[in-house]
């Protein structure tokens, strides 16, 4: 079960990624593409091109964690951009 603090910031990577990427690859995307450090907190979300798979990366007190989900049918919906 995934339990996170209610005040955690959630970051969605804007482009689809190769789902073969693991800790080092995702950590590099967070740093280079998103300009963030995964160890500073926050939940980082990544979708594949078909949007039927999602990976979440989060830093707990003692290391990085990756969760992955694959939908059997359908796809994840990207959130709408806010007007600001």
Image (cartoon, rainbow, N blue to C red):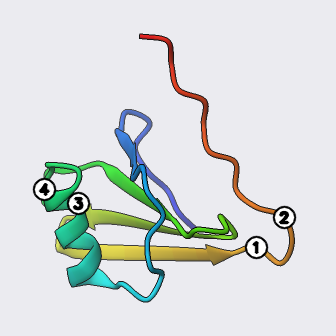
Q: Residue furthest top?
A: 84
**Element at badge 3?**
helix
On the image, the x and y values in percent for residue 37 come to 13, 56
**Element at badge 1?**
loop
- Give how far apart the Cα atoms at labels 4 and 1 are: 28 Å
- Where 18 sits versus 78, above or below? below
On the image, the x and y values in percent for residue 19 come to 48, 81
Which residue position is annotated with label 4? 37
Q: Residues within 10 Å of mark 2 (few under 14, many from 20)?
A: few
Q: Which mark is residue 71?
A: 1
Which residue position is annotated with label 2? 74
Q: Which mark is residue 30?
A: 3
Q: Earlier in the sequence, mark 4 or mark 1?
A: 4
Q: Disc 2 vs disc 1: Cβ atoms closer than 8 Å?
A: yes
- Give how far apart the Cα atoms at labels 2 and 3 are: 27 Å
Which residue is at the front of the view, 28 or 59? 28
* Left or right: residue 72 compared with residue 80: right
**Element at badge 4?**
loop
């Amino acid at each position: 079960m995934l339990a996170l603090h209610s005040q955690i910031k959630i970051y969605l990577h804007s482009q689809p990624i190769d789902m073969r990427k693991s800790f080092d690859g995702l950590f590099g995307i967070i740093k280079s593409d998103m300009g963030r450090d995964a160890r500073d907190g926050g939940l980082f979300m990544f979708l594949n091109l078909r949007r039927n798979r999602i990976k979440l990366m989060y830093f707990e007190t003692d290391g990085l964690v990756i969760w992955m989900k694959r939908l059997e049918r359908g796809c994840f919906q990207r959130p709408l951009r806010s007007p600001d």
